[in-house]
Amino acid sequence: MATDYDAPRKNEEDQSEESIEELKARRHDKNSGKVDEDETEAAESFELPGADLSHEELSVEVKPKQDDEFTCMSCFLVHHRSQLADADKMICRDCI
């Protein structure tokens, strides 16, 4: 007898599939067709206490670069001299 090697093979898991009656019964299950709720819509309905910052005004004091600081030429952040990894290229330790 010839063997068709292109035919799909069934293993024990495939053979132990549920019967048609079980599948039909599950089709009428209330939770089977339930669609997940969109997280952003759910999050918009929640209001956190103290979250209203519309009346707040932010103020930040900007100081010029100090003598013991440098600007990294890779990430363009101002770091302390102790973070300098390559003095010729002016690159910080995080970027190396």
Image (cartoon, rainbow, N blue to C red):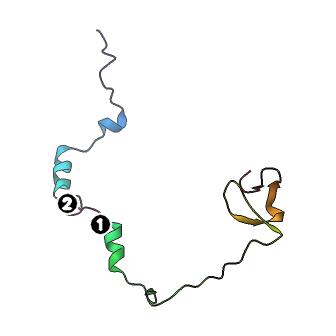
31 w.r.t. 88: above or below? below
Q: Which residue is mark 1?
A: 37
Q: Which residue is mark 2?
A: 29
Q: Name the residue: 21% across, 58% down.
A: 33
- Is 27 in front, or is 89? 89
- Per the image, label 1 sits on a secondary structure element best described as loop
The percent position of residue 21, horizontal first and vertical second, equals: 16, 48
Amino acid type indicated by mark 2: Asp
Per the image, is 47 magenta? no
Quarter of the image for residue 40 reads bottom left
The percent position of residue 52, horizontal first and vertical second, equals: 43, 87
Indicate left or right for 82 with 36 as reference.
right
Q: Residues within 10 Å of mark 1 (few under 14, many from 20)?
A: few
The percent position of residue 84, horizontal first and vertical second, equals: 81, 58
Q: Name the residue: 82% across, 64% down.
A: 81
Amino acid type indicated by mark 1: Glu
Q: CA gap, disc 1 to disc 2?
A: 19 Å
- Is 32 in front, or is 85? 85
Q: Which residues are magenta?
A: 31-36
